[in-house]
Image: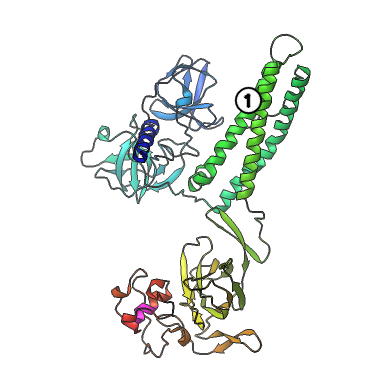
Amino acid sequence: MRKSLVIGVLVCWVLLHGFSGFAQSGIRALVVNEASNVRITPAIGSEVIGSAPSGYVFEFVNARSADGQWLRVDFNGNEGWVNITPLVILQGDINSLPVADPRSIPYGGFESPRAGQTNRVSPDIARVTNGLRIRNGPSQGYPTIGNLFANTLVSVYGRTASNNWIQVSHNGILGWVNSGFLEFQNGLQITSLPIDGIVADAPAIPLEGSTGSEYFDVLKLFLARIDLAQPSLDNIRAKWTDAALVGRAVCRDYPARPSDYVVPQPVLAANYGQLNPIQEVFNLAMADLRQAIDLFIEICNLPGTGNPVGQGAASNALALVARIDQRFADLRDKLRELIPPDLEPGPNECLLIYRQKAEILGVIQTGQIYRQFLAPNDRAVGFCFDALAGQTFAVELLRISGNVAPIIAISSFDNPTNILIVGRGSTSGGLTLAQPLIIPQNGRYLVLIYDAGGGSEPPQGEFAFALVPIINGITQLLAYNADTDTVTLSGVPGIQPTATGLNNTSSGLPNSSSAGGAAPVACPSITYTCDQLFTCQEAFACLASGNLSLDPDGNGKPCPNLCGP
């Protein structure tokens, strides 16, 4: 039964979305005004690509905007958008069209995007004859997702029905380019390519990128737009309430009609699951509010005097207002849930944004000691620090009490998944030092410390850590005095970075003398297993580089087959 349901849903999806390109939709639209401008995006003021005279019939209408005020058409072989105001629909229902918008939705929709990232390779090849932009769809209205230089060879997958745009890929980027700047190879004929091409494996990565701050900026903008629309809602509610009580409309001081909001495509693509539902409810609420205002204005423009309002009309309008009010309340609750209470870090704080979450972290100074607790309900802490390219630090961590087995990881602050160094402690205690950290470039870095887990009891305890500069081969090591409950840094000359990190007999890392003074041994691959490595030095190097699977018991000594039990 479940399988039949899944197949049924799949079939419905294919019927609704599978043929969205320039296939005939059965909708025909006639221009009844003097002329109708065709624009590259569905917005007044956007670039005009042509003008259709009175009497012109758009035979290929294949999509609509989210607010239903614009139609996507084929105009002289190019994709364009026309406003519905100067049109009369001769055939079909425009509400049956899929929603599209080159500013926010990739060609084909998010369900089957025809631009983005792909791993597929096509046997069909073309040469770029001039510099080209790869776009998110077959129109200048779509954002640029890549660039091509002259004489670049690209894989070719599809075309538009007009043959004006070709779907290509280069270095994994799948998108659309103008066919006038391609030279097909090996006798390839453009008409042999399928219309609309192939579906991308994943959304495009915009050239400008989408930062977490942009995501929160959009959330705050939604909230601000709701607050701006609230006076219009209050005004029209009062007007309809008065009309219901006295049976007449007071026709003056009409409230402002709020507009929809389209999230910029790069931000929407990166946060589609969170932003698209908000965008849909927001635009529905604004459409309802415009309708409530327009109905009132319509009554005021009826012929006759006194502007009478029937009880049925007033009741329906007030029900519409109540629905808008509920949508505003739901949106506010959702937005306040997603927006952190304070996005402004203080002078000794930094704002970390990752996967639509934000947190204020403390800024630490290199060369200073920090003490921290971990507990069952607080098993991770984070910090940030600033450093200059070429600086080298010993990353030290010392357990003071309890059973915590902390792991310390340092990464780029702007890209938290780009781990630069990892060090691991154990429940047996002792000083843990990770592989020396050499700062790759000027900037801010993230320090993440969390419990390794795996113990029989929940983690509970205190530890100290420090990022200690290594200057001329000299560093300092953390030391704990139980009598005074203090942690200090003691100077230790001659501590040199070795193949696997710093001298650290307590953690099981071999020191420079055990390495025989040999040149540093690098980890051949952080993904290797113990069976793929050849020496104990390689095993220690890979463990210090972050391959914790080489030390499953957490005792600081990897690969018993190479380093002994």
In magenta stretch: residue 461: no
Residue 317 occupies quadrant: top right
Please name the predominant secondary structure of the magenta segment in the image.
Answer: helix
Q: Residue furthest front?
A: 1
Residue beneath the point at 52% across and 86% down: 474
Quadrant of the snapshot with the C terminus: bottom left
Residue 158 occupies quadrant: top left
Quadrant of the snapshot with the N terminus: top left
Q: Horizontal and vertical percent for residue 411?
A: 50, 66
Q: Residue furthest left?
A: 187
**Quick one: 82 or 513, which is closer to the camera?**
513
Q: Horizontal and vertical percent for residue 144?
A: 45, 44
Residue span colored magenta:
535-540
What amino acid does circle 1 point to?
A: Gln
Residue beneath the point at 54% across and 26% down: 69
- Judging by the rendered image, the residue that carries numbered circle 1 is 291
Q: Horizontal and vertical percent for residue 470?
A: 52, 81
In magenta stretch: residue 536: yes
